[in-house]
Amino acid sequence: MKSILITGCSSGIGYATAKQLQQLGWRVFASCRQPADVARLQAEGLECLLLDVTDSAHIAAALAHIEAATGGTLDALFCNAGYGQTGAVEDIPRPALREQYETNVFGAWECIVAAMRVFRRQGHGRVLVNSSILGFAAMPWRGAYNSSKFALEGLCDTLRGEIHGSGIFVSLLEPGPIATRFRPNALVKFRQYINIDASVHRADYQAQLQRLQKEGDAAPFTLSADACAAVCVKALQAPRPKARYAVTVPTHVFWYLKRLLPTTAFDWALRRAVSGQGKNGT
């Protein structure tokens, strides 16, 4: 039975991937940051651990638990935990940036390092990292999140070169709009860290608030978490997985636009993609 650790399983892509892999016969070690979510998933029949990726002790304890439960093996790691900090670059305070990177980058990095010790010992393993369309297409109002995903892309591209020929594979998942709790979670951090009234962008932030509070899909071509999870399953089970898995029409479109257009034209396309979200979206 293959085994996997998935971070950020309380809802969305992590939760859907855990359920699909479990149905396919994998031993899934799902993980959540909140004890209430751990209890909920356990009640649903998932093997769920308490894991806050910003806490090194949590990561060490999770890997120790898995190795004890499996006899020292682990076949795959899916670094899915993360959230989006909205706000203009000039309005992001250092605590917000530090918190964004602790979750999105440093937590994933440390989980990979911990899993690599197992993978190296056994001579095989899979790493799947949840990046984003914003990991290569930097749209306005998302500087903290964009840069954290760009960092993950650099991490995985580097690691892929270092593990070549080892029997270990690393892949990036690059979703566009997916129906998850991403916007409600981003709204909490937006209100926590952005001083709207003191910003030169205060009028534009009203559009941001409307977007983050909107019910239902906020962008065209939005896919379900289950549809994205199916791509995760494909990546994890492929004999030779691809370096990148683009999910949703916008991701595919912007991937090609970045390669075809001059930078100034691509910048214009990125601004158009967020039109209606403030003056810089035109």
Image: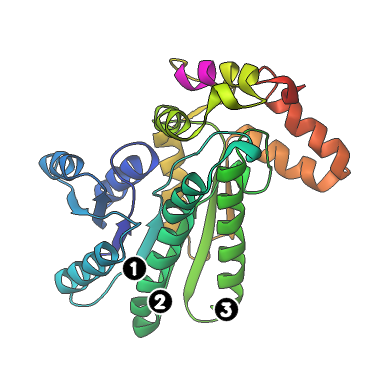
For the residue pair 59 and 6, the one nearer the viewer reads as 59
Q: Is residue 211 magenta?
A: yes
Q: Residues within 10 Å of mark 3 (few under 14, many from 20)?
A: few
- In the image, what residue occupies the spot 69% across and 43% down? 137
Q: Amino acid at mark 3?
A: Glu
Q: Which residues are magenta?
A: 209-213
Inspect this view and state whether residue 237 appears: no
Q: Main secondary structure of the magenta part?
A: helix
Residue marked by disc 3: 162
Task: Specify how the rendered protein is coloured.
Answer: rainbow
Q: Amino acid at mark 1?
A: Asp
When asked about the image quadrant of residue 181, the answer is: top left
Where is residue 246 drawn, in percent x and y? 59, 45
Where is residue 202 drawn, in percent x and y? 61, 21
- In the image, what residue occupies the spot 58% across and 35% down? 248
Badge 2 or badge 1: first in the primary sequence: 1
Residue marked by disc 1: 75
Q: Which mark is residue 124?
A: 2
Badge 1 or badge 3: first in the primary sequence: 1
For the residue pair 280 and 249, the one nearer the viewer reads as 280
